[in-house]
Image (tube, rainbow, N blue to C red):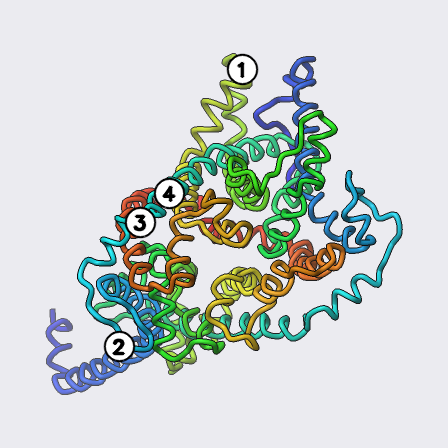
Amino acid sequence: MEQTTAVPMNGQHQPKTRQGTQRTGKYKRYLWGYLFLLPAVITFTLFLWLPIFKGVLNSFYIVDFVKGNSFAGFDNYKTIFADRDVMTAVKNTLYYMGLALAIGFWVPILIAIAISEMRRFQGFARVAAYLPYVVPFVVLYGVWRWLYDPVGPINAVLKAVGIGGISFMVDRNWSMISIVIMETWQSFGSAMLIYLAAVLSVPRDWYEAAEIDGAGIWSRIRHITLPAIKGQILLLLMLQLIATSQGFQTQFAMLDGGPNNATLTYALLIVKYAFVRLDYGVASALGVLMFLALSILAIFQYRINNRGGIGQ
Amino acid sequence: MKSFDRGILSSYDLKKGKVKAAYAIMNLLIIAMMCCMVYPILISLFNGLKLNTEVNSFPPTFLPKEWHFENYAKAWNYIDLPFYFKNTMLLFAGNMVVTILVLGLASYALSKMNMPFKSGIQYYFLMTLFIPATTYMIPNFINLKDLGLMGSFAAVWLPAGANAFFLLLLKTFMDGIHMEIFESARIDGASELRCFFQIAFPLSIPIFATLSIFVFATAWNDWFWPSFILSQENKPLSAAIRDFVLNARRLDLNIRFAILSIVMVPPVIIFLFFQKFILRGLYLGGVKG
């Protein structure tokens, strides 16, 4: 009893000053914290939020670097809805997204499961699968243009099998497919490694137990392996959809949207409006519309991320 | 690696004839896959050594009939590769410095310091993750023009500090460092700057190393954005290759392949050399795809 009362009595003078220095120390530390955050706040404001805001604003203006901007109301949006290329671009983008799912999405899952079963040289297979991912894009374009050439190696193999020559780049039925095959070749390795880590982390006893209970190989894959990597499959599905919906660089570099607009994606149309037609207002408006469409996808991705599909 | 006791298949399964055959086919398919992966890379190296007539022959040959090493000398002199290489390296170095200073300090503050409105500021950064970059690509271009940065390295360096994905990775990593270290350092009178540069930064070297892989890959690969916002004398290697090699009308295929090989070899060698480290780092940032 005595002691507890004695403490406040004893130092009636001292705690006050100590509290005072503590408070200034706290403010000083707040100040340092804000100072540390300041450069990031400035860069995020100047290089992300400002352009985002300007994009919405510019979509209602005619952007002219020389004479200055002039207000245009909804004219830019009217131009978009009157332009038939926009519909083509939307269709092409959906086609591209669909093809990338049909051709590219299942490949890494399949190969990850196959590689996980290898008893030897797993490391080699892993490195070989990932190797194309480090090839620079510009090299990729140059090499594959030759591989797809009417007198290139792929057509040589096809001819040996007895299939007539396919002009992969020029034929408008093949051009988008060729691009998706090339991109799958390059990038499936990184997705494959994520699946592989997940497949290898499935406890071995589960398979043991299933086998004792008489489960065949397919049912082991279907009921154990695939459910175990479901989180990764969903996450990479969302990421792939978000990436392919914005794809344009390959289409731009390989074919410039041709032949006859067959590879003109929506994002490529934005680029063309800006840098070919020099109509930055319409390009900004196209961006705003794209954002509205994609934000639905982004909300889904956020949900999946929050369920903890990432770092497992 | 630990010894392989069983996977989906057990050693009992593998004694069955049918399963054994299927397993053998699967292994053959993986070998075929590996060949498909490596073939385009090797053929571009070899095409760079052939005569132009041999590259254009049908069906194509794999190994050169005659080895023309002088092609690579010609390729080296076709455009000023060391000059563009220097630009790429300058971009990489500048981006790395900005990443460390701007994002490193910010993530340290978010992770290890307390202040009012901290979570609000964090949302201000992370909200940008939900806005796809393509949608504001053109406004971004106009914005850089308005800020007067167009053409200079600063147009790439400064925006490198506005990367919410890297910020998230850094902050998550720093959350794993024990608070006690900083508390005892503060009691010993260390300033916050000192806490960052002498404790937080050295302890976060692994995550900065991972980020440096991403930053390097971007600097080496990215051709589209730099070719629009950088002036001719500041262009990096990949943008120059695109302008002067891919779009060149009169350039022999063998020389073209030699140039492409020269650009491809450094990242491939770096990858093979640091392979274990890079693949481990990839899981950390695996989401980036």
**Is there CB contact under 8 Å for labels 4 and 3?**
no
Circle 4 or circle 1, nearest the eye: 4
Question: Label 2: which residue?
Answer: A30
**Is there CB contact under 8 Å for labels 2 and 4?**
no
For residue B64, above or below residue A121? below
Image location (x, y in percent) of residue B180: 38, 67
Q: Is residue B197 visible?
A: no
Cα distance, mark 4 to mark 3?
A: 9 Å
**Along the polypeptide, which appears first: circle 2 or circle 3?**
2
Q: Please name the amino acid that badge 3 sits on.
A: Asp
Q: Nearer the viewer, residue A206 or B143?
A: B143
Q: Residues within 10 Å of mark 2 (few under 14, many from 20)?
A: some
Circle 2 or circle 1, nearest the eye: 1
Q: Residue at x 62, y 30 (%)?
A: A117
Q: Please name the amino acid that badge 4 sits on.
A: Thr
SS class, disc 3 = loop
Circle 4 or circle 3, nearest the eye: 3
SS class, disc 4 = helix
Question: Label 3: which residue?
Answer: A83
Q: Chain of mark 1?
A: A
Question: Residue B246 appears in which quarter of the rendering?
Answer: bottom right
Please state if A91 lies on the left or on the right of B259 as rendered: left
For residue B42, above or below residue B235? above
Give the farthest residue toward the right: B66
Image location (x, y in percent) of residue A44: 33, 69
Question: Label 4: which residue?
Answer: A88
Q: Residue at x 68, y 23 (%)?
A: B25
Question: Residue A20 appears in which quarter of the rendering?
Answer: bottom left
Q: Please name the amino acid that badge 2 sits on.
A: Tyr
